Amino acid sequence: MEMKGAPALHGYRMPAEWEPHSQCWMGWPERPDNWRDNGVHAQKVFAKVATAISKFEPVTVCASAAQWENARSQLPENIRVIEMSMNDSWFRDTGPTIVVSDSTVTTDAPVPKFAGIDWNFNSWGGVDDGCYQDWSLDLLVAWKILAIERLPRFPQSLILEGGSIHVDGEGTCLTTEECLLNKNRNPHLSKEQIEDELKAYLGIRKVIWLPRGLYGDDDTNGHIDNMCCFAKPGVVLLSWTDDETDPQYEHSVEAFSVVSNTTDAKGRKLEIIKLHVPGPLYMTDEEAAGVIQVGEAKPRLAGTRLAASYVNFYIANGGIITPQFGDKKWDDEAIRVLSKVFPNHEVVGIEGAREIVLAGGNIHCITQQQPAIPTAIA
């Protein structure tokens, strides 16, 4: 069912990621011009991520017809595997943003508890700047998921990826100017017009704009989910480095300045918790050689700095699923910080997450939560 008007007008809002989920959606990687060695290494890590999440909430993995049997064989039986065509497996960005009605708005007809926003998508920048040339299948992913779940659909012409927004569920949204104001997304819209769309569709009242995302995150033009996220209302986790010679330092300091000098939608001053990035990681010759460079997708070149960040984790029902990059000092520190920030969650580190970042993202980028109604208002 296609819904008319903006979600906020119907009483919908985007819940925070720590609010209850009914399930998690993931894709299955295979394209050989982005995932090295035909995706075999990444598939093992995707299976680890899906398995870890499935201990906390139901998981559905979508795989192409050619890969369905392979995905089914690598995943435990408690994970649902369905067939779905796609151009690539970044479901944070191509899947729907599912919004919830808290039943506080009175309308003539009952409002369904859930609906989904089907954002427009252009492969993170279009034909000239995007990550691959054909994204026609990705454009249908959100629509298909909403159809499978029989959820109402709000179509949106705004080009926006789920990884470019983080919300606190209480009226505040985090994003970056580097991404949402990039000329390769919505050049016809002003900053104020984009804010208005976010408010109308996410049910928020305030947008906090960081200037830039993580250093080296060129694929997404600085998605917020690699740089900064809400840990709870009034508290954010920020990608950080103390190394003043690292280009990331300037990004982190300017973000710290912006966040520390603003308030959220409820007027609270935000607490900032620093989450140190791993030491600089670079694509090796062997890793680059495993990617089939055919011109359809963005080249993966040896020596490229990887956009690795521990902020790119997923909050499940009672679990924190976080990347581990093989840098023991900072891997361990990330587990320590996240365990302190989320004392009521079990923090699960995923070894080998480097395989995901080689293709341009990480755990948050490959997952998309489907909210549940909190029991208090169910």
Image: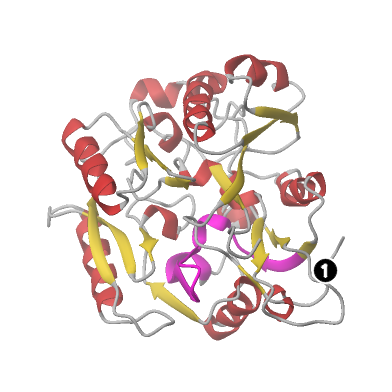
Where is the C terminus found, in terms of image quarters? Answer: bottom right
- Numbered disc total: 1
Residue 45 lies, in percent from the top left, at 47, 26
Residue 57 lies in the magenta stretch:
no
Q: Residues within 10 Å of mark 1 (few under 14, many from 20)?
A: some
Q: Is residue 328 above or below residue 306?
A: above
Residue 157 lies in the magenta stretch:
yes
Q: Residue at position x 50%, y 37% from top?
A: 56
16 relative position to 74: left or right: left
142 relative position to 256: left or right: right
Where is the N terminus found, in terms of image quarters? Answer: bottom right
Residue 271 visible in this rendered orientation of the protein: yes
Query: Depth check: 30 or 375 in front?
Result: 375
Q: Is residue 377 above or below residue 72?
A: below
Q: Residue furthest front?
A: 376
Residue 319 lies, in percent from the top left, at 42, 41
75 relative position to 210: left or right: right
Q: Residue at position x 50%, y 76% from top?
A: 171
Q: Is residue 30 above or below residue 172?
A: above
Question: What's the amino acid at mark 1?
Answer: Met
Residue 2 lies, in percent from the top left, at 85, 64
* Residue range (magenta): 155-180
Which residue carries the number 1 mark? 3
Residue 182 visible in this rendered orientation of the protein: no
